[in-house]
Amino acid sequence: MIDPNPSSKASRFEVRVTADSHFGWLRTRLSVERTMMSWLRTAVSLIGFGFAIVQFFERLQDMPGAQAARHPGAPKLLGLALISSGVLALLISIWQYRWFIGYLWSADFLPIAGARAGATKEKMQTPVIAVAVLLVGVGLFAFAAVLFRLV
């Protein structure tokens, strides 16, 4: 039903504190974790594949009897593009994850989140952000290694 008085400070929806709503909140929270882990897998694949392409074609050029490539810089550019895509995907997924977790712990959902009375944020801590930040570092190292031929 539409509120005839839009200036009232009622929330957008009614939150009923039931076991169903609490477990629905938990399922949503865990689906956010699964989504973040999917982003991590995708980013690791992009970074690893980009690095592997560069290494493979550099080793291929050094093999005796191999013909010179028409575009010798193409594998390096493709590798850099894949690595940077992986790092960018990680950064976007970290932002998305933090936004969604903040939304789930907003005042509207605190009653069904299972937070004790008086507690503002009893967030469940997971290592997924630490792993994502670590992988951003790995991706940046891989990008620099390919760009400056460190490896």
Image: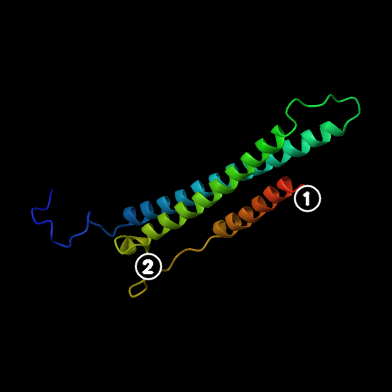
Q: Quadrant of residue 85?
A: top right
* Front position in the image: 34 or 132: 132
Please give the residue where the numbered disc 1 appears in the rendered image.
150
The residues bearing labels 2 and 1 have C-alpha atoms spaced at a distance of 49 Å
The picture places residue 68, in percent across and down from the top left corner, at 82, 26
Q: Residues within 10 Å of mark 1 (few under 14, many from 20)?
A: few
Q: Quadrant of residue 104?
A: bottom left
* Front position in the image: 78 or 95: 78
Residue sticking out furthest to the bottom: 118
Tell me, yes or no, if residue 45 can be seen here: no
The picture places residue 30, in percent across and down from the top left corner, at 46, 52
Residue located 42% across and 56% down the image: 99
Dots 2 and 1: beta carbons under 8 Å?
A: no
Q: Which mark is residue 115?
A: 2
Indicate the amino acid at tag 1. Leu
The picture places residue 25, in percent across and down from the top left corner, at 37, 54
Residue sticking out furthest to the right: 64
Q: Quadrant of residue 19?
A: bottom left
